[in-house]
Structures are given as C-alpha cells and as structure tokens.
Amino acid sequence: MDMKMKSLQIEGKEVELLAEYPVRFACMEHLEQELDDYVNDFEAAPDTYAAQAIEGDGVDKRCRECGEPAQIALLKEKGM
C-alpha cells in the first residue's frame, strides 16, 4: 500500500515529505525487493527509517508485500 503524505512525525520531529513520493513500509525479508521497486517506480532512492520511529495513529506500518509488521519505512524527505 502506498501512502501519500505531506509530513510525518519521526522520533517526535515533524518531517516534511516530497508529495510526489509515497511512504512505504517493508519487513526485513522484503526490504531489498521494496528498495528495488521504489527506485524502479520513482527513479529515486528513498530515505529509510526504522518503522518504530514513525509516529501517528493513521499510519499503517505493515509490509506492503506480505502484510506483516514492518521494520523499515521508505520515504522521501524534503531537502534531502
């Protein structure tokens, strides 16, 4: 599942995101595949964070591939 967001709370800090890039989550088993897919789909390498660092009630932190709890968040920060 792709989530388009303007900003996220990461470790208590408001982080602005590039709107044209989605936020995706991956478990460790599917991380390499998700990284490859992100680069292929958007022609840009994502910024990565531990999924547990992402705060917010409306954020679905399940692996896009298998639906299991994710360990890694893939996103694009503004200014990075």
Image (cartoon, helix red, strand yellow):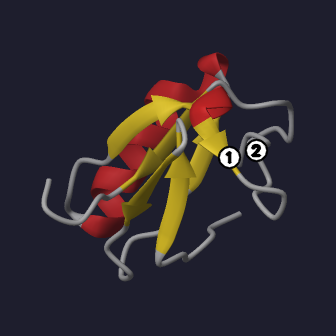
Residue sitting farthest toward the top: 28
Q: Which of marks 1 and 2 precedes in the sequence?
A: 1
Tell me the residue at 23%/48% (across/down). Answer: 45
In percent of width and height, residue 43 lies at 20, 63
**Of the pair 79 and 75, the residue shown nearer to us:** 79
**Of the pair 2 and 66, the residue shown nearer to us:** 2
Pointer 1 local density, CA inside 10 Å: few below 14, some 14–19, many at least 20: some
In percent of width and height, residue 38 lies at 39, 53
Tell me the residue at 37%/68% (across/down). Answer: 17
SS of the residue under disc 2: loop
Q: Which three-letter amino acid code belongs to the residue tagged 2?
A: Lys
- Rendered view: 1 above or below 66: below
In percent of width and height, residue 72 lies at 56, 30
Residue 53 figure quarter: top right
In percent of width and height, residue 15 lies at 39, 58
Looking at the rendering, in which quadrant would you find the N terminus? bottom right
Work out how far the residue at label 2 is from the one at label 1, CA to CA, in angstroms: 10 Å
Left or right: residue 26 versus residue 70 is: left
Q: Which residue is mark 2?
A: 61
Q: Which three-letter amino acid code belongs to the residue tagged 1?
A: Glu
- Rendered view: 8 above or below 36: below
Q: Which residue is mark 1?
A: 55
- Rendered view: 37 above or below 23: above
Left or right: residue 61 versus residue 29 is: right
SS of the residue under disc 1: strand
Tell me the residue at 61%/18% (across/down). Answer: 28
**Of the pair 27 and 48, the residue shown nearer to us:** 48
